[in-house]
Amino acid sequence: MARRSWHKSADTRAEILNEAERQLQAVGYADMTIGSIAKSLGMSPANIFKNFGNKAGLIDAVALRWVMEIDAAIETTADIPSASIRLRAMAHLILETHLARGKMPARLAIMIGLDSTPPPSAIAFFHRLLQRFEKLINDGIAGGEFAPCDVTVTAAAVCDCLVTILDPAAVLRGRSLFTVEEMTQKCDQLVDFVIRGLGLRA
């Protein structure tokens, strides 16, 4: 393939990320290489290294696009006054985003998890999610919906309870066993369980 002329950095990064996602879907994490992406796009591998540093940096950028998509969806719930309703909306949006993205986020998470730590962007997103849960719990306590508690510990426990919704690999496993409607019902059941645990006690 003849070499193409690349000018706009943002356009170049987007095309590289798009091709990386395509190859991740087609051949998997191990067989997707800087060289294979460069060859497909008709550019020098140096261009990819310049934009992303190495394969780990490229994977982190792919993961960042995914988690930013989820974070943007969660942000739409920020103005819901009821903490319980906000929690349910957050859980549904996360599940819907994972389902819409298909198999690749889960497969990538599994493949990377076999021999490496998650991409920094994914770790940062998890910490941001914890902070969102902490704020939600604080709001619920202030509004009289939830019992006073150690907010940091409780937010981590909420994440653990909702792991089958938060983890794309768990969503993929669930999708092989249940319909989307059944998974949505299970999401509601998990949220109901969490809300009961957070609720005021006599």
Image: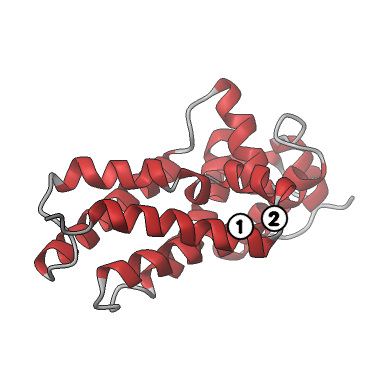
Residue 163 vertical placement versus 31 (above, below): below
The quadrant of the image that shows the C terminus is: bottom left
Image coordinates of residue 117 in percent, x first then y, are: 48, 28
Image coordinates of residue 118 in percent, x first then y, are: 48, 34
Image coordinates of residue 165 in percent, x first then y, are: 51, 51
Q: Residue at x 65, y 47 (%)?
A: 174
- Viewer-nearest of labels 2 and 1? 1
Residues at circles 2 and 1 in contact by the CB criterion of under 8 Å: no
Q: Amino acid at mark 1?
A: Met
Q: What residue occupies the far right of the structure in this picture?
A: 1
Q: Which mark is residue 167?
A: none
Residue topped by disc 1: 183
Relative depth, front residue between 59 and 67: 67
Label 2 residue SS: loop
Residue 75 vertical placement versus 170 (above, below): below
- How would you rate the neighbour count of disc 2 (Cα within 10 Å): few for under 14, some for 14-19, many for 20 or more? some
Residue topped by disc 2: 102
| Tag count | 2
Q: What residue occupies the far front of the structure in this picture?
A: 202
Relative depth, front residue between 25 and 134: 134
